[in-house]
Amino acid sequence: MDGLLTDALAYIEAAGWLAPVLFIVLHILRPVLFLPVLLVTLAGGYVFGLFYGMIFSYVGLMGVSLTFYWLIERFPKVYNKLKMVKEKLLGSKASLTIWQLLLLRIMPFVHFHALSFYVMEESKHYRDYVKQSAVMNISPAIVYTAFGGLIHELPLPGLIVFSLFLALFMFIIRPKKPTDAYQPNDIDAPLPQK
């Protein structure tokens, strides 16, 4: 995955005036290529700088949101799977404000399309979906691109410290694997099967 992103970014950097178009296309193809939103948007800040990176990332995120709306109902298995992910993430009767959606959109471990699915289900029609997506996509375009620009501007020692901080942060918030071992202190735990 990292090799694919690195190759794509090298190609985009060498593309000259076509670079923004290729970057936006990379954003739109990102779900098919299984690239995380965070990495692609960070790369936008790194390659294009803060201002243009935000603009190109925002256009790319809107492209993803708009194509998602038209494609999701054409794939019933994906639709049902996203419905399950959304219900697991937000519950079946969630009622989120736009501010909550803005915050959830920048959480790296919240599924991008589960939030888009939530907005799609809550919208009365396509125009409402586009309006909410337009607001919701502002936060990742600004926050992630700013980090990408920051990484590009940092001197080597600062980049090393920042990378160590990110590695520590990823270690702290990593998913904990549940243990299958029998815990004698747990009264409600069933006894292990033989």
Image (tube, grey):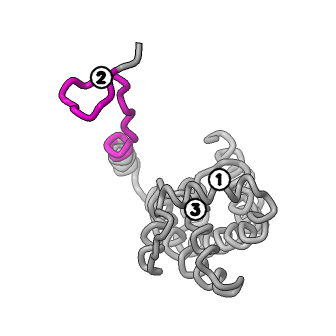
Tell me the quarter of the picture where residue 29 sits: bottom right
For residue 182, which numbered disc appears in the image? 2
Is residue 179 visible from the viewing direction of this image?
A: yes
* Residue 18 x/y as whole percent: 79, 66
Crowd tier of the residue under label 3, counting other residues whose Cα lies within 10 Å: few below 14, some 14–19, many 20 or above: many
> At numbered mark 2, what does the secondary structure look like: helix, strand or loop?
loop
User: In 3D space, how far apart are the residues under numbered discs 3 and 1 (Cα atoms)?
Assistant: 10 Å
The three-letter code of the residue at mark 2 reads: Tyr
The three-letter code of the residue at mark 3 reads: Ala
Q: Is residue 170 magenta?
A: yes
Viewer-nearest residue: 152 or 32: 32
156 sits to left or right of 70: left
- Residue located 44% across and 80% down the image: 97
For residue 114, which numbered disc appears in the image? 3
Compared to residue 190, the image places residue 70 above or below, namely: below
| Pointer 3 or 1: first along the chain | 1
Residues rendered magenta in the picture: 168-191
| Pointer 2 or 1: first along the chain | 1
